[in-house]
Amino acid sequence: MENNKTENIKEIVLAGGCFWGTEMYFKAIRGVVKTEVGYANGKTQNPTYEDVCHGNSGHAEVVKVIYDNQVISLPFLLSMYFEVIDPVAVNRQGNDVGSQYRTGIYYLDPTDEAVILKSVDQLRREYGVPLAIEVLPLKNYSSAEAYHQDYLIKNPGGYCHIGNREFKKAAVARDPSLK
């Protein structure tokens, strides 16, 4: 990658329920360079899927989204995220229930916090009720096991709380604020 291209690369970690579909959704969006599923902001280091599923590790199932901010802005990426979550559901997305399925936006760059809070506040005003989306700095992150990476590509019949309509929308989405 050219040096100036590297400066455009940003990272955000998003919790939106089961990470299989959430990863596939973000992978389809133009400007997303790479995705990886993992576990974030829990009480332990390097948890396993089993640790997280038992609900006592405190981790959320997340997708690390690496994107080119010259192709997609953080506000647009967050607007796409909001389209595939239930922002008022506590510890639940679709049929998945448990604290590991909570919604959250975990940032690495402190300058992203203001942008995130503005986007979440706009969404809150639309709903008119408190939202269940955590907005926190990323405290810790562990990559999920290899079999979870690109799970729905490897297992197209696998369960997903995100519908085909949303996957198709992600594939054609373009950030109108950028060229």
Image (tube, grey):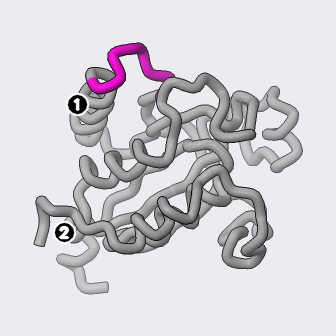
Type of amino acid under label 2:
Gln
Please identify the quarter of the rendering in which residue 57 is found: top right
The correct choice, above or below, for 147 with respect to 76 in the image is below
Which residue is at the far front?
Answer: 165
Which residue is at the far bottom?
Answer: 2
Q: Residues within 10 Å of mark 2 (few under 14, many from 20)?
A: some
Q: Is residue 127 magenta?
A: yes
Taking the spot 81% from the left edge, 30% from the top edge, the residue there is 55
The correct choice, above or below, for 173 with respect to 2 in the image is above
Q: Is residue 163 magenta?
A: no
Q: In which quadrant will I find the N terminus?
A: bottom left
The mark that comes first in sequence, 2 or 1, is 2
Query: What is the x, y in percent for residue 95?
Result: 74, 40
Q: Nearer the viewer, residue 156 or 76?
A: 156
Asked which secondary structure carries label 2, the reply is loop
Type of amino acid under label 1:
Lys
The image's mark for residue 151 is none
Residue under label 2, please give it: 70
Please identify the quarter of the rendering in which residue 145 is found: bottom right
Asked which secondary structure carries label 1, the reply is helix
Residue under label 1, please give it: 118
Label 2, label 1: how far apart the Cα atoms are? 20 Å
Please identify the quarter of the rendering in which residue 59 is found: top right
Left or right: 75 with respect to 35? Answer: left
Q: How many labels, in total?
A: 2
Q: Nearer the viewer, mark 2 or mark 1?
A: 1
Please identify the dominant SS of the magenta region.
loop
Taking the spot 23% from the left edge, 31% from the top edge, the residue there is 118
Taking the spot 85% from the left edge, 40% from the top edge, the residue there is 51
Q: Which residues are magenta?
A: 126-133
